[in-house]
Image (cartoon, rainbow, N blue to C red):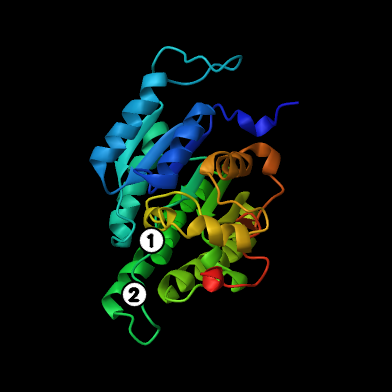
Amino acid sequence: MDQPWRRLEGKVVMVTGASSGIGRELSLDLARAGCKIVAAARRTDRLKSLCDEINSFGPLSLSSFNPEPSVVQAVAIQLDVSAQSSVIEASVQKAWDAFGRIDALVNNAGIRGGIYSPLEWPEEEWNALMATNLTGLWLVSKHVCKRMRDTKQKGSVINISSINGLERGQLPGNLAYSVSKTAVNALTRVMALELGVHNIRVNSISPGIFKSEITKGLMVKDWLDRVTKKTVPLKTTGTSDPALTSLVRYLIHDSSEYVSGNVFIVDAGATLPGVPLFSSL
């Protein structure tokens, strides 16, 4: 029996950080599931390429995976999540107007920042990271969820966090990134608590090591496979499809209407042993 969340016809999904990496992969996957995509990011050239690709195969029919005649299924919205609230709200309004509503928001935009001792973190870099990973995520959620509330429509917010936001997933040198992702998980729980009355669900996903623009330097390290086999219970790193794509689909689908306030850990069990990742180097 097929999982019902494989098909999401009629859903309008806004994805931030959609121009590359996991955001791009999620956008393509959700479009293949039948969603209309509002792709948001700073780099409009990459967004145009993504939307052109999605619009070239059009919406999927209910009976097969063969494309129907091409219609607009994806639109690009320039969005800098580190901008001022009024600028973000203007972009959210354009996103909302693109298809007349937003059913689900995937907050994927984020940066990792540098690697520093807690005593050496530059304040300017700290503030820039928090503006993108935390404040921007909150502001996008705030402006989207206000519109969901005001139009009395149910919605789903999915925050892409990190295992660095877990007590058991800390790595040295990642102070600001870890703090931002820990805060995202707290934000997820409090928003879920307070927005449930408006039938808006909020969940987080904490991925382990996946190939993306943020991790491209790590993925090419010759020691990664050796460390993975020693410290990760499932002895592997992840691929976003299906590990993340299937979970995102589920959290958008109406079958997850009883699921809110959770932090889903998708890391092959990497954080379970309580042993720092680099201990086997």
* Residue 274 x/y as whole percent: 65, 72
Number of residue marks: 2
Residue 247 vs residue 213, the one in the foreground: 213
Instruction: Give the amino acid type for the residue marked by disc 2 in the picture.
Output: Trp
| Residue 217 x, y percent position in the rendering | 37, 57
Residue placed most toward the observer, 177 or 253: 177
- Is 145 drawn above or below residue 188 in the view shown? above
Give the residue number, with chain letter if any, for mark 2: 126
Disc 2 element? helix
| 146 or 14, nearer to the observer | 14
Residue at 47% x, 15% y: name it.
Answer: 67
User: Which residue is situated farthest in the top direction here?
Assistant: 69
Q: Residue furthest bottom?
A: 119
CA distance for labels 2 and 1: 14 Å
Q: Position of residue 197 (x, y in %)?
A: 64, 55
Which image quarter holds the N terminus? top right
Q: Say left or right for 214 vs 264.
A: left
Q: Position of residue 271 (x, y in %)?
A: 62, 65
Q: Residue at x 40, y 46 (%)?
A: 21
Dot 1 crowding, Cα within 10 Å, few <14, some 14–19, many 20+: many
Q: In the current view of this chain or complex, which residue is farthest to the right?
A: 1
Q: Give the answer, above or below, for where 240 lies relative to 57.
A: below
Q: Earlier in the sequence, mark 2 or mark 1?
A: 2
Other-residue count near label 2 (Cα within 10 Å), few / some / many at <14 / 14–19 / ≥20:
some
Query: Visible in this render: residue 160?
Result: no
Please identify the quarter of the rendering in which residue 194 is found: bottom right
Q: Which residue is mark 1?
A: 136
